[in-house]
């Protein structure tokens, strides 16, 4: 991709008319373009490892496929649109046809992100990008500063989390396709909201995955739990690296996304001198600077490896931030008592304290789940480099029957957890519906067309999370009911208990934005004290401005007394509906005090 963000491959609309087609296919003997409903074929010319053809009468809106010498027709590996699904032809899209109105949008600092993760298909009744856009006023009033879309690349069928995408450049047709996605991003920027896209560079889905027919996109040298690993360091890997890096630049440039969340980077394997993620990060930031915008790369990593965040000068990848899974594990495990699989051992306030003040809980000590020493210390990393959450798509769906926290603990305990999250030194992430204690499950769902594959996925899903699944509560991913059950229950926002939760989230977010001691990401100015036996925790937050905050958390079913002098402090929030003060904090509740600053 050039400095101006133009892709090097695919269907490029030419300024003087016509379309240039180029495809990387280093081991293919011959290719042709099949154009339009009449399926007219035009032979392509080899150019090094590529095939190319310029067709003067091709135009945006036309559908096309690439034809192999044995008659196979396949979509473009870098198709911008797949209106007939993963097995159908690609469609020519003119990236200059959309009229953007966000020229003054420059992005926001990572420290200012308050994320809201959502699944396009279940977030609204419409299940589309336009449906998401219809909720922007609600999200802005909630106070979030960024929406995060689960993957939108074209996947098989109409129901899927998106992690089985196979056309990485094509926004899903059932969600509205390219133009609707651009309208959504444009509308978000007009509303002052950043937009994050979840992308998957560790594997592709099993159905409609035709990349290996064009080139050495995959390798058997490494294994992932989800499919063949991408080839980032073997023979022919230069073209694969280009394919992925240009995809990241494509979302930044053509769709104006503000950040990418990289799925499961522990499934990305590369022994090259320059790791693919380091190269991607450098190219992404260079392009953002060229565009005059702030933009970020955020990783999901199961490695507890601080090198993900360390700068290149220290041998790291230099990524901007990563998801903080162990904040979830510590709070969720303590509140629910779930103590199995990867949640094993997360049952003490000491782990919540460490997750808040240091980051990684497992930082080189023994992990019972992994049965070995695990992790490295992230103590010196600033808080804004960890995205913390109580719930997300994985952590809801991977527990028993996809139950949200609101189905596992009391409303008071949910409010207590929300206070911990939104007063922590980390950019918080909310999962859709969390803010009003939605009770609908969020389940794993798919809609594969291949019956054998569908059966294999159902059986594989059960086996993978058998430890976290109770007898009789497994939901078949292929069943339509599983998808329908996962839709947000918006009617609940008008009911008393759910409305009170929504008010609390709005108030906490407003306080985080107002008081620098809550929103500054300073782990070094954050201190946590606790009593395991009495089940209380105190979090102190500070700021160079002189602003200070104290959050008193009582996890006990009885009232708790704190050794805290309230004189000179302002009580700005309490989670319980009954009165309380530092000497008598109600059961399962929190009090927030502020002093100093403005």
Image (cartoon, helix red, strand yellow):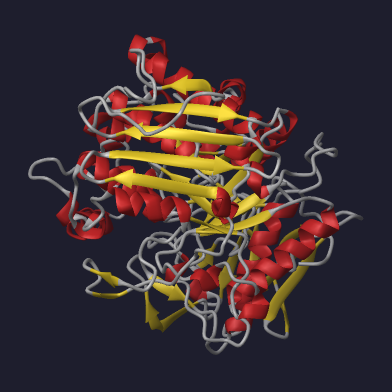
Q: Position of residue 442 (x, y in %)?
A: 32, 37
Q: Quadrant of residue 10?
A: bottom right
Q: Quadrant of the C terminus?
A: top right
Most foreground residue, 16 or 366: 366
Q: Position of residue 555 (x, y in %)?
A: 27, 34
Give the left or right position of residue 303, taking residue 115 as reference: left
Give the left or right position of residue 128, taking residue 576 as reference: right
Q: Quadrant of the N terminus?
A: bottom right
Give the left or right position of residue 254, taking residue 531 as reference: right
Residue at 80% of width from left, 39% of height from top?
A: 105
Residue furthest right in the image: 16
Residue at 63% of width from left, 32% of height from top?
A: 515
Residue at 38% of width from left, 63% of height from top?
A: 206
Q: Position of residue 237 (x, y in %)?
A: 58, 82
Q: Quadrant of residue 277?
A: bottom right
Q: Position of residue 149 (x, y in %)?
A: 53, 43
Most foreground residue, 19 or 351: 351
């Amino acid at each position: 991709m050039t400095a101006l963000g133009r892709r090097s491959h695919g269907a490029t609309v030419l300024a003087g008319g016509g379309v240039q087609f180029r495809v990387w296919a280093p081991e293919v003997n011959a290719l042709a373009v099949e154009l339009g409903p009449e399926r007219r074929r035009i032979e392509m010319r080899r150019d090094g490892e590529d095939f190319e053809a310029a067709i003067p009468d091709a135009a945006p809106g036309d559908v096309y496929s690439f034809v192999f010498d044995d008659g196979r027709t396949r979509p473009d590996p870098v198709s911008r649109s797949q209106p007939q699904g993963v097995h159908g032809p690609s469609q020519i899209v003119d990236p200059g046809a959309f009229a953007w109105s966000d020229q003054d949008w420059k992005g926001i600092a990572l420290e200012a992100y308050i994320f809201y993760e959502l699944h396009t298909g279940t977030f609204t009744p419409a299940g589309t990008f336009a449906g998401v856009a219809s909720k922007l006023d609600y999200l802005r009033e909630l106070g979030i500063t960024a929406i995060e879309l689960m993957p939108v690349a074209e996947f098989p069928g109409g129901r899927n989390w998106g992690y089985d995408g196979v056309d990485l450049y094509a926004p899903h047709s059932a969600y509205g396709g390219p133009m609707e996605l651009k309208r959504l991003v444009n509308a978000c920027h007009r509303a002052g909201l950043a937009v994050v896209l979840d992308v998957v560079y560790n594997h592709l889905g099993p159905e409609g995955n035709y990349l290996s027919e064009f080139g050495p996109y995959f390798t058997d040298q490494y294994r992932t739990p989800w499919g063949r690993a991408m080839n980032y360091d073997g023979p022919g890997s230069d073209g694969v690296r280009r394919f992925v890096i240009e995809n990241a630049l494509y979302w930044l440039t053509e769709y104006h996304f503000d950040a990418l969340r990289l799925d499961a980077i522990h499934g990305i394997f590369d022994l090259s001198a320059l790791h693919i993620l380091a190269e991607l990060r450098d190219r992404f930031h260079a392009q953002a600077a060229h565009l005059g915008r702030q933009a970020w790369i955020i990783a999901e990593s199961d490695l507890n490896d601080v090198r993900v965040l360390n700068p290149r000068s220290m041998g790291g990848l230099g990524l901007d931030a990563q998801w903080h899974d162990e904040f979830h594990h510590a709070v969720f495990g303590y509140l629910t008592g779930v103590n199995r699989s990867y949640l094993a051992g997360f049952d003490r306030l000491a782990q919540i304290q460490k997750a808040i003040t240091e980051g990684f809980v497992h930082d080189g000590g023994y992990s019972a789940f992994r049965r070995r020493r695990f992790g490295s210390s992230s103590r010196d990393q600033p808080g804004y480099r960890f995205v913390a959450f109580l719930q997300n798509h994985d952590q809801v769906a991977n527990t028993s029957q996809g139950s949200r926290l609101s189905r596992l603990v009391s409303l008071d305990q949910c409010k207590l957890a929300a206070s911990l999250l939104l007063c922590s030194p980390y950019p918080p992430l909310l999962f859709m519906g969390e803010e009003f204690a939605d009770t609908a499950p969020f389940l794993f769902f798919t809609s594969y067309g291949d019956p054998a594959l569908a059966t294999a996925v159902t059986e594989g899903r059960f086996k993978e999370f058998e430890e976290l699944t109770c007898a009789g509560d497994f939901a078949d991913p292929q069943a339509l009911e599983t998808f329908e059950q996962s839709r947000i229950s918006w009617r609940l926002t008008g009911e008393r208990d759910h409305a009170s939760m929504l008010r609390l989230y709005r108030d906490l977010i407003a306080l985080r934005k107002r008081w620098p001691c809550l929103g500054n990401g300073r782990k070094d100015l954050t201190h946590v004290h606790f009593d395991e036996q009495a089940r209380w925790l105190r979090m102190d937050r500070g700021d160079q401005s002189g602003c200070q905050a104290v959050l008193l958390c009582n996890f006990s079913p009885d009232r708790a007394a704190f050794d805290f002098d309230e004189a000179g402090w302002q009580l700005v929030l309490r989670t319980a509906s009954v009165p309380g003060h530092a000497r008598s904090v109600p059961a399962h509740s929190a009090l927030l005090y502020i002093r100093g600053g403005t």
